[in-house]
Image (cartoon, grey):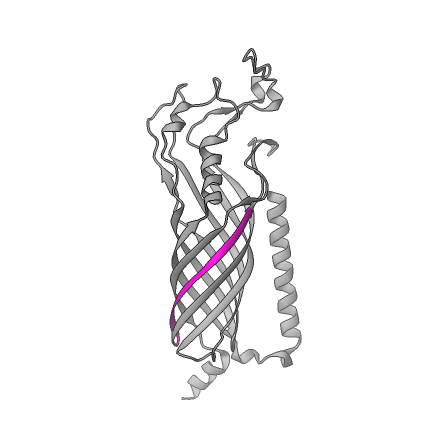
Amino acid sequence: MKTKLTSFLSTTLLLCSISTSMAFASESFYEKDLVRGFISFGADYRSMNSAHIDYINDIIFNSIPDRSGTYDTQVDNYGHFGDTYVGMHFNIGAEYKQLMSWFNINFMPTQVSKKPASIGDFGDPLYDARWFSYGLTWMFGWKLLNENSVINIIPSTGLGMNLLNVHFPSMYGIITKESGYDPITGVVAHPENNLIVKNRYYSNFASTVNAELEVRLNLDPISVGLYGGYRYIRYSEFNITYDQNEEIIYVLGSPDANGDTWFIGARVTWTFLSKKQSQQKLKL
C-alpha cells in the first residue's frame, strides 16, 4: 500500500510541476492577470453499490479464516453497515475564462456499529466497529456557457486516490500459515506467529476516477451549485501487518475490489478577484 501511495503522490507532484513550468514558461499561452483562484465547500448524499458495501462488511465481520478457538462469536451480534452516508469535500483551485482546475479533498464522518457487550467470548474487550474514508482528486472542468453567466453548466473529471480505514470489533486472533495450525487436531505449533488484531485502524489504498456535472448559480464572487456524479474506485488487497516491521501477514478481500459510489449534493464557492480586477478596483 505504501509503495502504491508513494508512487501516486510522486506522479501527481511531477505532473503539477510540469504543468506549472509549462504555463509560466509561455505567458503568450494565456493572460495570467485573468486567472482567478477559488475555494469551495460542499456536502453530498453518497450511495455505494452492493459490491462496495459487501466488501467493507466482509472485511470487518466475515473475513476471519478460522473460527475454532480464535474467533469471537460476539462479532455476529454487530449490526452491519448500510450502503449510504454523507460525504463532505473542500476544493481549492483556479479558473481561466471557462477552464477550471482544482484539488478536491473529500472525507466523511466515521460510520460506527456499536459493540453488543464489553467483553467477548474469550475475555478480550470488544470495540465499536468503525470505518471511514478520505481522498484527494485532481479535477479539470469546463464552463459550457460564458464564464460570467449567471447560470452555468460545468462537467468535470479527474484522477485521484482514496484511503479506506477500518477498525475491527474485537482483538480476535488470525491463524496464519506461519503458525503451523493443524485443522484436524486443532494444535497450533507456533502460536507466536498468530496475528492478534490490534485496537487500531487498518488502511487500504485505492486509485479513483471521478466524474461529475454541476449546475451553478453565479452571484460573483459567491456561487451556489448543485452537482451529481460517479466515483470509480478500485481497492488493492487489504494487507494486515505486524506493527514492528510492517511484514505482510494476512490478506483480506481480493485485489481490484469494486468500491464505486455515486453522489448528489450542493456546494458554495468563493471566487477571488484576478490581478487585473484587483488593479481596476484600486483605480476606482
Q: Residue furthest top?
A: 185
**How far across and how far down the image is residue 172, in percent?**
46, 25
Q: Residue furthest front?
A: 50
- Indicate whether residue 231 is drawn in magenta: yes
**Over which residues does the magenta segment extend?**
219-234
Residue 200 visible within the image: no
| For residue 78, above or below residue 21 | above
Q: Is residue 22 above or below residue 77?
A: below
Residue 36 x %, y %? 49, 74
Q: Quadrant of the N terminus?
A: top right
Check if residue 161 falls in the magenta segment. no
Q: Which residue corresponds to the image point at 42% horizontal and 28% vertical from the top-left?
A: 170
User: What residue lies at 46% left-to-right and 23% top-to-bottom?
Assistant: 71
Dominant SS in magenta = strand
Quarter of the image with the C terminus in it: bottom left
Q: Position of residue 110 (x, y in %)?
A: 39, 44
Give the residue displayed 59% in from the left and 20% down from the top.
Answer: 179
